Amino acid sequence: MSRLPLEVPALGLLLTMSFATTTVALQAPTSLSKVGILDKNSVSLAQVPASDSPVADGIYLYGSSQKPEEIGQEYLVFEARQGKVRGAFYMPSSEYSCFSGKVGTQQISLTVQDPYDTTTYSHSIALGASSSVASADGRLPIEDSLQLQGYHSINQISANDQQMLNACQANF
């Protein structure tokens, strides 16, 4: 049986998988800032722009809600490096799905891995219109570097977010 590219939103995929017995333990969020050096157990978000990437290198967290870790809401945490992304879609108190992909000019194109049978699906997220103007070298400004349609940027990353991100980077 051939598989067609995933045409339903990632939330539909995650809702379908959320009834499984595998869960992710939640931990209290840890605040991060976009600028500056943090303590040795923290990471910073989107600080260093890549030389030819349309988005600044760094760690990003987005949610269908503006608040982190709300039950029933979809989130994605990922790291961008030179226009490539790797991370996880998740819903709090549920499993997560790893993804990798590439940031384009109008969308992020992703390959999402099913957490149960390692089947992969294509998925894309449209980039939203930015309220800021791009810099002279074509990169987006760091403070407003990536807007995803249907998602809100969240400037906090929990230990659980970092754990999922690390697992996806190591295994996908």
Image (cartoon, rainbow, N blue to C red):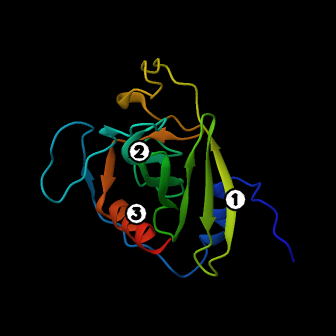
In the depicted structure, whether residue 108 falls above or below residue 134 = below
- In the image, taking residue 17 as reference, residue 75 lies left or right, namely left
Rendered residue at 43%/32% (across/down): 145
Q: As shown in the figure, which amino acid type bears the numbered disc 2?
A: Lys
Does the residue at mark 2 contact the one at mark 3 (Cβ under 8 Å)? no
Residue at x-position 41% and y-position 49% = 81
Rendering coords of residue 77 (x, y %): 44, 54
Q: Position of residue 135 (x, y in %)?
A: 42, 20
Give the percent coordinates (x, y) of residue 40.
Answer: 13, 57
Which residue is disc 3 drawn over?
165
Q: Is residue 81 above or below residue 97?
A: above
The residue lying toward the viewer, choosing from 71 and 127, is 127
Quadrant position of the N terminus in the picture: bottom right
Which dot marks residue 122? Answer: 1
In depth, the one of 100 and 52 nearer the eye is 52
The foreground one among 126 and 106 is 106
Q: Secondary structure at mark 2?
A: loop
Q: CA distance from mark 3 to mark 1?
A: 19 Å
Q: Which residue is mark 2?
A: 67
Task: State which tag comes first along the sequence, 3 or 1.
Answer: 1
Sequence-first tag of 2 and 1: 2
Q: Secondary structure at mark 1?
A: strand
Q: Earlier in the sequence, mark 2 or mark 3?
A: 2
